[in-house]
Image (cartoon, coloured by chain):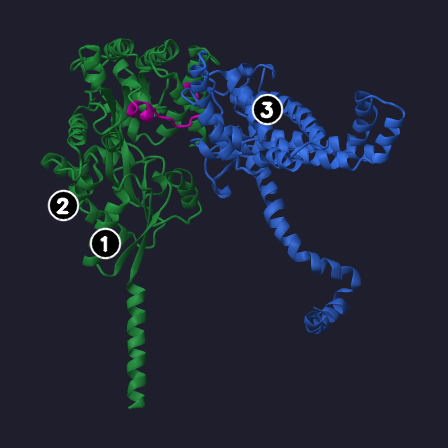
Amino acid sequence: MLKLITPVMQVVEWPMRALQRVLGPRRLAWAFLAPNLVLFSLFAFLPVILNFVYSATGSDHILLRDRSYVGAQNFAQLLNCQSYTDPNSCRIDVFWRAVWNTVSFVVLQVTFMVVFSLLTALILNRKIRARGFFRAVFFFPVLLSPVVVALVWKWMLQDQGLLNATLQNLGFGTVNWLLSPGWAFGWSVFISVWAHMGFYTLILLAGLQAIPRDVYEAAAMDAAGPWRVFRRITLPLLMPTMVVVLVLALIKGVQTFDEVYAFTGGGPGSATMLVIQYIYQTGFAGTPRLFGLASAASILVALVLVGLTAVQLWLTRRNANG
Amino acid sequence: MTKFKRVLGTAAALALLAGAAQAVELRFECAQDGNECDTMNAIFQKFTAQHPDITVKMDLVPYKAILENLPVDLAGGAGPDLAKVTDLGGLHKYYLDLSPYVNKADWEKTFGKTLDWYRAGPDDHGIYGIQTQLTITGGFINKTLFDQAKVAIPGPGATWEDWAKASVAVAKATGTKYPMAMDRTGHRFAGMAMPYGATYFDDKGNPELGDPGFVAAAKQFVAWNQDGTMDKNVWAAQGGATYADASKEFINGDLVFYYSGSWQVQKFASQIGDGFDWEVIPAPCGPAGAGHCSGMPGGSGVVGFKSTKHPKEVAQLLDFLAQQDNYATLEAKSLNIPAHAGVAAAGVKYEGASPAAAKALNAFAAQVPTLSPVAYAYQGYKNNRAMFNITVTRLTQAIVGELSLDEALARMKDDLAQALAAAK
């Protein structure tokens, strides 16, 4: 290997030394960082800046030169509500329906996700038969495409789907799961938990395995019961991992789009429309394409995500400092 | 000798370069609908045989790319030379005016009112596109179910309510799951709204979603979805303006009456086969009276774009496609209803169509002369897609109970104002 690297280094050495003489050792670091910074600016900073610029413009034209400056009008439209808890009183009612759907979705999804992931991780951490197989089974849905997950569940839950056929064969009445706002929303949460639980289970499992065994042995010698061991040892020592899982699940929950969109399309009506779907439909799938309104909505969502990330950093640091 | 060879070689190279400079390749973007793009491509090859210096490169793309990517490409100046489009008025600002290159009077005589669908408004007299696929919305019935139920099929002039009553009676007698269904789009809903007297435009020609006819149809449609006359799954189980249809239910024999359009004929002919007898019914009427029994026209057309570097060649190609024999070949092979007056008058001998399909296509073709002026105006209005989407989104909210019908109608008015302001 060294034989290969040495000639390359000999070729590179001279220009590097020359560059160092010109720039000095401190500035040379910037020369190395420059290509990455250019790419990062182009694909990360520029879209963010453009998003802010678009949010202050109107019309359905895509090129900035054709768009008119409207100031904060898009934000004003989105935030124009008599009562934020009643979407019907809002100028853009669908946005607020999507916001409240997202809040309910995140609360339910994150709660179930953390609880079920923890339970699964606790079970898979025990010496059970075929433990490797079950770990793979729980992780498998994470590998599937969200659209595949959504379509498979849709085939099972549609009016003449597998679940209703089974219920009918067993002599029960059928339910039109996708026509009822409550059921459609409930199933969306369930599918999302089912699809992503394996990922969080894996993180918690790693956290559980990092807990020193001697602490449990000491507890066993003191005749501590399983519930007490869980409450006093497992949970406190797992807390740093739990915080990571909680915040990751929260951020992912707010960003949910593909599987719910493919599963219900946001329906019935707007019962399962989440805020990212609203942004997509307003900016790209609707006619006319309201890029300004979609950009403004995406900035509001970004602010929420920045807040959640700040909470994560604060909690992580607090945990690290004991 | 060597010197001579060098001169000869240079001359040959220059001749080749000159030839290459003159050769024109036109990029044509097309979303396959049945075999329409392939048939067009074969006609374009014939064109190239006559004009060896002009070749056509066809890019087959998904329909979604035509709806969502093409407008963005055109806005960025990176569009193709020509494309098959369905948002006929919506993309007007990018169209190439063929008037300087074609016989305008001939085109006016041949394609008549469909030319308006590509224009900016009544004051625009340009020639922008050729309607290759004329579609008409209309009703299909499962005739076998009517026969089994011994319910008489409503005759010509029957209203939407007559069809609803008959369909419910058939569904009840035969144990069929759904009496009626309609595709989830504002375009199809217009086929029901016009017989109820919907005008879609006020006296000054401004678009509106809330005239008395429209309100009456909306009220009836919501009621039919709520009482089970209409298959609620089609409209209510979706969100936003997502398209949904009930072709699967009709093909499976789970539906008595299906309001869709002429583009379903090929699919029904091939997938239903001998399963049951089906028919195309005359356009249902409504409270507005006999003059308003009309479906909605639509379809797709081929347009050139003004960003092309070869406007003359694009016009030549479209003019070639518009020639009666070429156009007749296209319609006969792709099983479409012709928008070309000469081809329509001569009749189309559909190739490979089953007797049921041919009968259905001719039944739809017979409805073309009776299409309402409102239907032509609405189809030709450049912001009609926004109106379609608003209708679907808000009517669905009324069906599922998120909004009352009055609230939904008020929201439609606001949404339309916002859309028109953005589209200015």
Q: Residue furthest left?
A: B346
Which of B148 and B403 lies nearest the eye of the viewer? B148
Chain of residue at mark 2: B
Q: Which residue is mark 2?
A: B325
Which residue is the site of mark 3? Answer: A102
Between A40 and A101, the one lying in front of the other is A101
Residue B289 screen position, x and y as percent: 21, 12
A190, above or below A244, in the image: above
The furthest residue to the bottom: B1
Percent coordinates x, y for residue A205 in the rendering: 71, 34
Magenta highlight: main SS? loop
* Residue in the picture at 63% in, 53% down: A38
Question: Which corner quadrant of the image does residue B378 belong to?
Answer: top left
Q: Is residue A73 visible?
A: no
Q: Which amino acid is tagged 3?
A: Thr
Magenta residues span: B236-252
Chain coloured blue here: A
- Residue A101 position, x and y percent, is 57, 21
